[in-house]
């Protein structure tokens, strides 16, 4: 049996298993007891506002809008090669709208999983603030019920705390991009709300595993003793007397300007005034996936323009912010390191490269929001025999494509550049 057939068989078996779990869990939802005892939540609320309006609790609920909706004026990126039609369609349909940001209070609310899924007192998942990346695994499930919580037969023991807890946890919080754009802004929303930071007894997060997590929490004044970590290796649900639920951006349209301003003011409160602008290349040499296989040749080529390679894992968040704030041109493969574009000055040039099977539009929209000049081109993907996930494939960069991107960005030619191209 070939490797491709084996992978397809494994995928089919996993999909069938998920369907069986979903079907059994759906039966449990019809039984006359809460998901605190067995099974998943009884249903869902599409928004926090709907959950607040429907609440019959004697304890007051609240919903406070902190930032109104906004629109981003999206500028066209500059492409070296034509964009694949599917990606072009996705780009044209990319929503320039940013939803309103809010803080709500749900009495007797629960948090399940290290991803911070919120369950209201009437036993419904609040989908608006319960982002789940497992949705693509269940194409046969109605959209609101793709969340993995609806495939759970038991949500774990209930830890009931007579306290006011704030939900900060988000899906993929160990990824720099999601930590910076999804999680940290929730702290700022609470700070600006009538609830206020002082009324919070503890902040609910997933397990803290990265240095950038503790660094940024310290900067924002959240001490370790006020953090309640939910483990990822066993099911548990935390029930609060008052559950404070700030909105989460979670890829709903473009990144709002208020999030960008919050991050900039927090980590580069006084941008450097140096007139010497830096040309940087972001290396993924330490990454486990999406590595540039011919990076040695690429670095030799870029040195002729004055680019310096940077391994961001070696820098603190503040150091990364200062680096990007001083950058004139940035060349990088698509990856979480480009989160730091939020710290760039207007007019900074960004050259991002993708593989054709995985084009993520997030940094283009961020560049539009911050008035950066965004260029892109496609590299060649080099897949392992058992690799099914396009965004994990390693890549090979054609130096002529990179050269063309630099030309479009008006980067001065050099003798070394021509020598590299002729090899």
Image: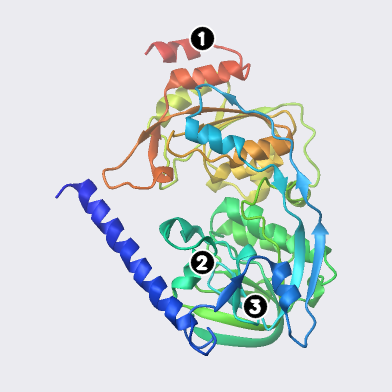
Task: Sort mark 3 into few (<14), some (14-19) or many (20+) by Cα contacts within 10 Å.
Answer: many
Question: In the image, is 188 to the left or to the right of 334?
Answer: right
Q: Earlier in the sequence, mark 2 or mark 3?
A: 3
Q: Which residue is mark 2?
A: 145
Q: Which residue is mark 1?
A: 415
Toward the viewer: 133 or 414? Answer: 133
Q: Is residue 145 visible?
A: yes
Q: Earlier in the sequence, mark 2 or mark 1?
A: 2
Toward the viewer: 218 or 46? Answer: 46
The quarter of the picture where residue 398 lies is top left
Q: Position of residue 381 (x, y in %)?
A: 38, 34
Q: Is residue 346 above or below residue 132?
A: above
Label 3 – label 1 distance at C-alpha: 65 Å
Q: Which residue is mark 3?
A: 120
Of labels 2 and 1, the one closer to you:
2
Q: How many marks?
A: 3
Q: Is residue 261 visible?
A: no
Q: Position of residue 239 (x, y in %)?
A: 62, 83
Q: Earlier in the sequence, mark 3 or mark 1?
A: 3
């Amino acid at each position: 049996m070939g490797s491709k057939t084996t992978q397809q068989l494994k995928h089919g078996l996993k999909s069938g298993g998920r369907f069986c779990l979903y079907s059994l869990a759906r039966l449990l939802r019809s039984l006359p007891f809460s998901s605190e005892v067995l099974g998943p939540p009884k249903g869902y609320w599409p928004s926090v506002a709907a959950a607040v309006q429907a609440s019959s609790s004697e304890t007051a609920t609240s919903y406070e809008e902190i930032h109104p909706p906004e629109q981003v004026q999206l500028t066209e990126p500059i492409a070296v090669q034509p964009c694949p039609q599917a990606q072009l369609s996705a780009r044209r349909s990319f929503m320039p709208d940013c939803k309103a940001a809010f803080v709500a209070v749900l009495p007797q609310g629960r948090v399940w999983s290290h991803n911070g899924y919120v369950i209201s007192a009437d036993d419904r998942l609040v989908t608006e603030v319960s982002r789940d990346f497992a949705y693509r695994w269940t194409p046969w499930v109605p959209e609101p019920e793709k969340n993995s919580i609806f495939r759970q037969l038991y949500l774990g023991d209930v830890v009931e705390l007579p306290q006011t807890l704030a939900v900060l946890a988000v899906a993929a919080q160990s990824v720099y991009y999601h930590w910076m754009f999804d999680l940290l802004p929730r702290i700022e929303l609470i700070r600006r709300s009538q609830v206020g930071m002082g009324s919070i007894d503890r902040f609910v997060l997933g397990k803290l595993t990265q240095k950038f997590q503790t660094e940024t929490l310290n900067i924002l004044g959240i001490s370790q003793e006020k953090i309640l970590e939910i483990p990822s290796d066993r099911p548990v649900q935390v029930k609060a007397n008052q559950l404070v639920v700030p909105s989460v951006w979670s890829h709903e349209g473009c990144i709002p300007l208020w999030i960008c301003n919050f991050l900039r003011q927090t980590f580069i409160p006084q941008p450097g005034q140096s007139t010497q602008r830096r040309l940087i290349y972001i290396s993924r040499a330490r990454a486990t996936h999406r590595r540039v296989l011919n990076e040695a040749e690429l670095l030799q080529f870029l040195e002729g323009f004055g680019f310096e390679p940077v391994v961001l894992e070696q820098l603190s968040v503040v150091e990364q912010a200062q680096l990007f704030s001083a950058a004139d041109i940035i060349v990088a493969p698509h990856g979480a390191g480009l989160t730091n574009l939020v710290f760039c000055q207007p007019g900074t040039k960004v050259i991002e490269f993708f593989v054709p099977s995985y084009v993520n539009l997030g940094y283009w929209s961020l560049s539009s929001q911050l008035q950066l000049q965004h260029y892109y081109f496609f590299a060649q993907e080099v897949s392992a025999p058992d690799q099914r996930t396009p965004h994990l494939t390693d890549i090979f960069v054609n130096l002529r494509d990179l050269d063309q991107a630099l030309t479009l960005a008006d980067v001065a030619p050099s003798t070394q550049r021509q020598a590299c191209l002729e090899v």
